[in-house]
Image: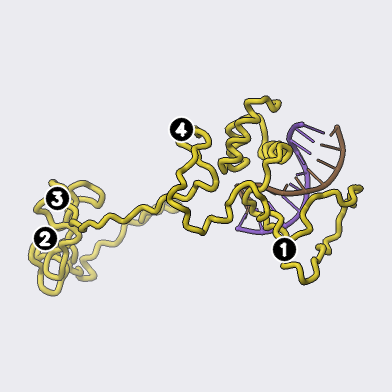
Chain colours: A yellow, B brown, C purple
Amino acid sequence: MSWTDERIEKLTKMWESGSTASQIAEELGGVSRNAVIGKAHRLGLKARPSPVKEKPAKVADEAPKPKPKVDPKPKVEAAPRPAAPAPAPRAAAPAQPQQAAQQPLPPSRHPRIVSVGPGGFLRQGPGDQQPPIPPAPPRRLVPAKPSTDIEGKTSLLDLNERICRWPMGHPGEPDFHFCGDKVNPGFPYCVEHCGRAYQAQLPRGARRPPPPLPFGGPRVR
DNA sequence: CCCTGATTCGC
DNA sequence: GCGAATCAGG
């Protein structure tokens, strides 16, 4: 793929509107993330918040500390790099007033639509990405109305020490509820369900031994 | 490890 | 000019 005017324009818009290089590359298609970044730099679009911290740029008084890292490949290039010897090279970029991110912006600033993204959402400039703080509307919390098929049934919230909590149906089913009868004192269930929950221990002789499984048979839980 | 952008350098 | 490889950080 070549960089046609259209593609360059798209790249520029997306780049300036804050899309990541990956997103741009995906949108354009046929190019890699690196290609996008490389092109963007060649176009002079750089200077965006990068995960890589900018140079220390300590305030001019202490040793500049020229990074003792050994350069594996010494450049022929001497020092034509305009990489500001002055402190804070990135912040000095006159392009976007992005340093005002923490400052409350004047209300006169209205969002500037930069482009229309896939799906129709409107992209905005990096400086305009201050989403309005949604005001918490004062409202009273109203208890949710239980669905009608649970109406009159004993729900989880209705359970207490005195009512039978024997499940009726299965959790997740629309009409799942609990027995709700008066409890058998000292037990979590009513008399009827206690009879199902607690089986009398049979005398040893009357106990039916578990059927022997064939060797190697399937495990049963 | 995923992601990000920056930089380098052979083509 | 291009972009893969690499770097460096989140």
Q: Do labels 2 and 4 share a chain?
A: yes
Mark 2 and mark 1: Cα distance apart in space: 69 Å
Viewer-proximal residue among A91 and A119 = A91
Residue depicted at 10% across the width and 67% down the height: A183
Q: Are marks 2 and 1 on the same chain?
A: yes
Q: Is A116 displayed left or right of A85 in the figure?
A: left
Mark 3, residue position: A150
Q: Is A86 displayed left or right of B10 in the figure?
A: left
Considering only order in the chain, which callout, 3 or 1, is on the residue closer to the N terminus? 1
Q: Which residue, as the protein is rendered here, is positioned at the far right?
A: A76
Q: Look at the numbered discs 4 and 3 and tell me whether their residues touch, using CB distance below 8 Å.
A: no
Is disc 1 placed on a helix, strand or loop?
A: loop
Mark 2, residue position: A180
Q: Do labels 4 and 3 share a chain?
A: yes
Considering only order in the chain, which callout, 3 or 4, is on the residue closer to the N terminus? 4
Mark identifier at residue A56? 1
Q: Residues within 10 Å of mark 1 (few under 14, many from 20)?
A: few
Q: Quadrant of the C terminus of chain A?
A: bottom left
Is disc 3 placed on a helix, strand or loop?
A: loop
The chain holding disc 3 is A
Considering only order in the chain, which callout, 1 or 2, is on the residue closer to the N terminus? 1
Q: How crowded is mark 3: few (under 14 residues within 10 Å), some or many (20 or more)?
A: few
Mark 1 and mark 3: Cα distance apart in space: 64 Å
Mark 4, residue position: A119
Task: Kindly identify the amino acid type of the residue bearing the numbered disc 2.
Answer: Gly
The chain holding disc 4 is A
Give the number of callouts: 4
Q: In which quarter of the image is the N terminus of chain A?
A: top right
The chain holding disc 1 is A
